[in-house]
Image: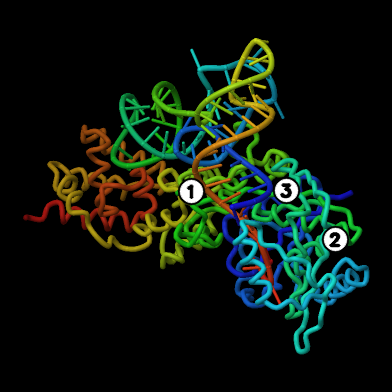
Amino acid sequence: MTVRTRFAPSPTGYLHIGGARTALYCWLQARHRGGQFILRVEDTDRERSTDAAVQAILDGMQWLGLAWDEGPVFQTARMDRYREVATGLIAAGKAYRCWCSRERLDALRAQALAAGAKPRYDGHCRTHAEPVPGITPVIRFRNPDAGTVVFDDRVKGRIEWSNSELDDLVIFRSDGYPTYNFAVVVDDIDMRITDVIRGDDHVNNTPRQINIYAALGAPVPDFAHLPMILGADGQKLSKRHGALGVMQYRDDGYLPHALLNYLVRLGWSHGDQEIFTLSEMIALFDIADVNKAASRFDLAKLGWLNQHYLKTDDPVALAPEFAWHLRAAGIDPATGPAPADVIVALRDRVQTLKEMAARARIWYAPIAQWDARAVEKHLRAEGAATLLAAAHAALAALPAWSPESVHGAIERVAATQDVGMGKVAQPLRVAITGTAVSPSIEHTIYLAGRDEALRRIDVALARATAPG
RNA sequence: GCUCCCUUCGUCUAGUGGCCCAGGACACCGCCCUCUCAAGGCGGGAACACGAGUUCGAGUCUCGUAGGGAGCACCA
């Protein structure tokens, strides 16, 4: 039997980090086993579902590269089917209509709570159904009264549930929409899902869903419940923790495969391996190796991974994404050096493309601000003017313009003037960038372009020698 | 309150009864390298929640305690 997994978000917000990991694990499981990955949109909550959220989820999935084989299937497009199945259940005596009022239900709940028990529906309408004029009844599933439900969760292990803990849940609301627990089961059966991989906030739903499978005479799929992802403070992830939507990570300068690599290791491991290419993930991923406990989101480690990929990926391949960030920062890539060259100069110094874009500004726009301390220390230093002038001449005379040739020129200036590299590099750094910190001096100068570099050295020379 | 689940360095984790006085990675600290900042190299501190039990032997098995989480909706 070919493996079929599905990711089934409800479109009430963007694709957050927890959902992205669930989607990744579903996708990996399908790819690893040579099966299919289906995307289903659980939009039966008409109050909270929005088209914008659907789009946000699709965008997030696409950016991450989690391609689905079927879908997106919208539950709202399957209403007739849910109704058909529910009607069948009623006909078979496995479900019934219920007219119980909200008041009666509330009273029941309060009573149970007061008695220190778990609130459960008492099954009143199983036998005493009294149609109330003008009221559309809900449909309840007739849950078995006795026995236990046992399932072998692929990550949590064996879980056993007594049917006495379960009650007759509503499977169809009075507004004509099916409830979650019912729609998922009908969908998972119809879509022939073999592996249900979802957040562990659903373990409690699983026994009642299994009972529905049984009532429908359908085979029960494998279940794997993933532990939660918490914020760095160990609290449930929320808006307080900042960037939540996956697309926010793009805006913040993270690479999709860096995020994927981070996510795959968060709660799953393969020995001591930290770095995984997509194909390694697919080859090595096993749902059985997923951890049981919740884990915390650690931005520092994501940053480390992101930089790892900035350093090891082909700069040319990274260039389009970097150019996107330059534009996002209000920089026109056409007004300066090739983005790929900038990546080479900065990738050892930043963890994100966003930081990189910010630092790249000096090569695309004039120096906006001079660091007074740097000017004082390096530009107005003893001999700085002489060195700048010598560098200017050496750079102007260079037959070819490349990081290597620039490096050679600076080295020759240092040798000729009989000073260390630092003595000539620092004034030049301030001349080109206005600050004492930048990439290696040859890249700093190279990226400015010869004309602009010489122009800036001229300006710096004036500052170096100006009185005061 | 009830039911279910979870518990190894600050964080992510390795560990499936002896190979573990617990290994790796991120973070942190130190040293080296060095044109600044980084990156890199080398080194360091840092954990089996607690208590019983089973066993020749327990991070690994059992029970209890504590702490954390989820669910108990006509929300998904």
Q: Amino acid at mark 1?
A: Gly
From the image, tell me which residue sits under label 3. A224
Residue in the foreground of this view, choosing between B4 and A391:
B4
Q: Secondary structure at mark 2?
A: helix
Above or below, comparing residue B53 to residue A374 in the picture? above
Say which chain tag 2 marks: A
Asked if the residues shown at circle 2 and circle 1 are in contact, with their CB atoms under 8 angstroms apart, the answer is no
Residue at 28% x, 48% y: name it. A429
In primary-sequence order, the first of circles 1 and 3 is 3
Residue at 18% x, 53% y: name it. A461
From the image, tell me which residue sits under label 2. A189
Rendering coords of residue A402 (x, y %)? 42, 47
Quadrant location of the C terminus of chain A? bottom left
Circle 3 packing at 10 Å, graded few (<14), some (14-19), many (20+), is: many
Rendering coords of residue A103 (x, y %)? 65, 77
Rendering coords of residue A121 (x, y %)? 73, 66
Number of marks drawn:
3
Asked if the residues shown at circle 1 and circle 3 are in contact, with their CB atoms under 8 angstroms apart, the answer is no
Residue in the foreground of this view, choosing between A374 and A230:
A230
Marking on residue A234: 1
The verdict on a common chain for dots 2 and 3 is: yes
Q: Secondary structure at mark 1?
A: loop
